[in-house]
Amino acid sequence: MTRLRGGVVTAVATLVAVTGCTAEQDSGAAGPGQSGGGGAALTAAGSLTVKGRAPKTGYSRDRFGTAWADTDSNSCDTRDDILKRDLKDVKFTGGTCKVTYGLLDPDPYSGKKITYRRGRSQVDIDHVVALSDAWQKGAKYWDPGKRIALANDPLNLLAVDARTNRGKGDGDAATWLPPDKDYRCEYVAAQVAVKKKYGLWVTAAEQSAMKKVLAGCPDQKLPTGGNPTRAPERFRAR
């Protein structure tokens, strides 16, 4: 079963390998469930650079900027943007940004129906590629603008059940997969897409796990779109 999430891709930049990294993307607005024509996810997983996990030394959330920065300059913070995209029957307060109610139906990780009410932590916005995992696989060496972009890129964000998400922690595909097996192909494809877009590497065990999942859905496309890979200059991180 395939559950597509997110909006229609408005523009997709071509990924070009340059000294082991990908070229900067300039536009797009899709979430991690939006399939595009960027090639099979299984093939892309095999193209990722394989290295060992670097130390977590120096990591903090602050290295990726203020949480939910409005990097796309639409006057809504990133968290509310993703809630609006992923929830059904959305209700707002004070305009069309601040989401106060909605239904996550189904939650992609558990398959359950979750009610979102602002101020109650039943829905998280997950970084599909966890920021700590990214730090240990290349992001430590980036300039702050690229880290801020990753933290707020819709391609890397998904509204999910909070309890299930907190069991994930900063796990990669080798250590954590969604309990709902029907979503695993889409989930792993999203991780591959983010790592390819930003030039992050994978461990050998992670790549093996990705290939194992995607071998069961060899026609799975690679999600595309999202925000540029560098945040506007006005945003700062440590």
Image (cartoon, rainbow, N blue to C red):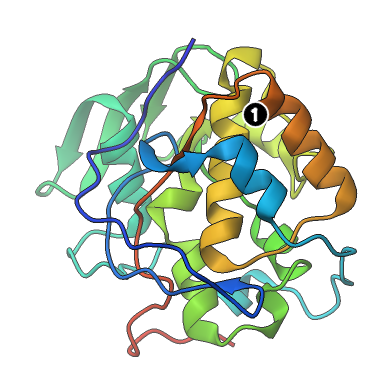
Closer-to-camera residue (148/53):
53
* 172 with respect to 189 (left or right): right
Name which quarter of the figure residue 49 lies in. Answer: bottom right
Q: Position of residue 194 (x, y in %)?
A: 54, 54
Quadrant of the image for the C terminus?
A: bottom right
- The image shows residue 130, relative to residue 17, as above or below, that is above
Which residue is painted at 50% across and 78% down in the image? 146
Among the 4 quarters of the image, the one containing residue 41:
top right
Relative to 38, is 111 on the left or the right? right
Kindly identify the residue that appears in the image at 84 percent across and 55 percent down. 203
Amino acid type at image mark 1: Arg
Q: Is residue 16 above or below residue 223?
A: below
Residue 14 percent coordinates (x, y): 38, 62
Residue at 72%, 29% in the rendered image: 177
**x%, y% of residue 207?**
79, 45
Residue that label 1 marks: 163
Q: Is residue 57 above or below residue 48?
A: below
Question: In the depicted view, which residue is nearer to us: 186 or 66?
Answer: 186
Image point (32%, 83%), residue name: 232
Picture mark count: 1
Q: Position of residue 214 (x, y in %)?
A: 66, 28
Label 1 CA crowd tier, 10 Å (few <14, some 14–19, many 20+): few
Can residue 123 be seen here?
no
Residue situated furthest left in the rendering = 95
228 or 12: which is nearer to us? 12
Q: Nearer the viewer, residue 81 or 129?
A: 129
Q: Is residue 127 above or below residue 90?
A: below
Element on which disc 1 rests: helix
